[in-house]
Amino acid sequence: DPDKLYCICQRPYSKRFMICCDKCTEWYHGFCMGITKNQGKKMAVNQHVWVCPVCRGQSML
């Protein structure tokens, strides 16, 4: 769905790296979360669990 909004920025998918929260399964832009595509690949290889700021109870403001 090209109109679906993601992330804390509430913008659509942008063909850039995105990361999925392992708790709520929502998708976030890597740029907004401060995670590069290479960091995301390393996290996947190492089976690192990534939990978004919302699930961690952190404010992004």
Image: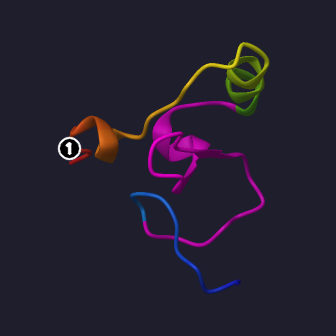
Residue type at tag 1: Ser
Name the quadrant of the N terminus.
bottom right
**Residue 39 position within the rendered picture, expressed as x and y whole percent measured from the top left:** 68, 22
Judge from the rendering whether residue 35 lies leftward or rightward of residue 54; answer left or right.
right
Judge from the rendering whether residue 54 lies leftward or rightward of residue 19; answer left or right.
left
Disc 1 is placed on an element classified as: loop
Eyeballing the image, is 32 above or below 41? below
Taking the spot 58% from the left edge, 31% from the top edge, the residue there is 35
Taking the spot 52% from the left edge, 66% from the top edge, the residue there is 6
Eyeballing the image, is 7 above or below 36? below
Can you identify the residue that label 1 sits on?
59
**Residue 18 position within the rendered picture, expressed as x and y whole percent measured from the top left:** 66, 48
**Residue 52 position within the rendered picture, expressed as x and y whole percent measured from the top left:** 41, 40
Which is nearer the eye, 55 or 2? Answer: 55
Which is nearer the eye, 31 or 51? Answer: 51
Q: Main secondary structure of the magenta part?
A: loop
- Which stretch is magenta? 10-36
Is residue 59 magenta-colored?
no
Looking at the image, the residue that sits furthest to the front is 23
